[in-house]
Image: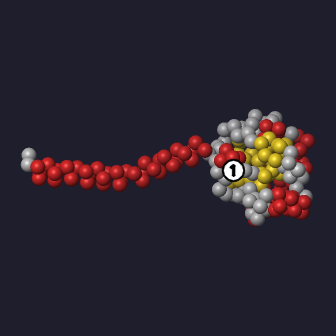
Amino acid sequence: MSPARRYLLTGVVVACAAIAMWLVWPLAMHKAAQAIIAAREITVTKGAPDFTLKNSVGKRVSLSDFKGKVVVLNFWATWCGPCKTEIPWFEQFQQDWAARGFTVLGVSMDEDGWKAINPFVTEEHMNYPVLLADEEVNQKYGGIDALPTTFLIGRDGKVAFVHSGLAPRGEYEKEIRSLL
């Protein structure tokens, strides 16, 4: 085979390989991204990742402090409209079912911290523990990218229900009752 012909054939092979990579690369990256997201995602029946955060007076509170209880773990923010809709429901649930081994645990995602949270908690008369999130908790729960995001955790510590965005009050009531 002549050098020119070999050079041309090599060029064709390299071009075909480049085109194949160009076509396959997005698919490979999409599959890899899906695998990463699935590994991080908290799904029903997975154990809820434990964490420790501080409350408004600096006391460290862990999710494991509520072991054996039904927990509504609510990620929210003071500026979030749907969160403001849910909070009165959660206050009522806390009042109605606390004696049955139930608690709501609010985790604020406010970037302004306690400066924004404390006046809001006082104004809304929130009757359940409120903590300030950090990046570690955010990552443990799959990277919270919608507010509110709520995990209903059974007495066994496993996530039973997940809501990203506002869910109907009746749906929460039904799910909580099934866990109590």
Q: Residue at x 52, y 44 (%)?
A: 35
From the top left corner, tell me how far across and down residue 94 is, in percent.
Answer: 87, 49
Q: Above or below — where is 66 with respect to 21? A: above
- Count neighbours of disc 1 (C-alpha within 10 A) and say few if under 14, some if 14 to 19, many if 20 or more: few
User: Which color scheme is applied?
Assistant: secondary structure
- Toward the front, the furthest residue is 3
Q: Above or below — where is 8 with respect to 49? A: below
Asked whether 172 or 81 is in front, the reply is 81
| Number of numbered discs overlaid on the protein picture | 1
Where is mark 1, residue-wise?
135
From the top left corner, tell me how far across and down residue 30 is, in percent.
Answer: 47, 51
Asked whether 134 or 40 is in front, the reply is 134
Can residue 13 be seen in this snapshot? yes
From the top left corner, tell me how far across and down residue 175 is, in percent.
Answer: 76, 46
Can residue 69 be seen in this snapshot? no
Asked whether 90 or 41 is in front, the reply is 41
- Toward the left, the furthest residue is 2
Q: Residue at x 48, y 46 (%)?
A: 32
Q: Residue at x 88, y 40 (%)?
A: 100
Type of the residue with mark 1: Glu
From the top left corner, tell me how far across and down residue 81 is, in percent.
Answer: 75, 65
Quadrant of the snapshot with the C terminus: top right
Asked whether 103 or 122 is in front, the reply is 122
The local secondary structure at tag 1 comes to: helix
Q: Residue at x 37, y 51 (%)?
A: 24
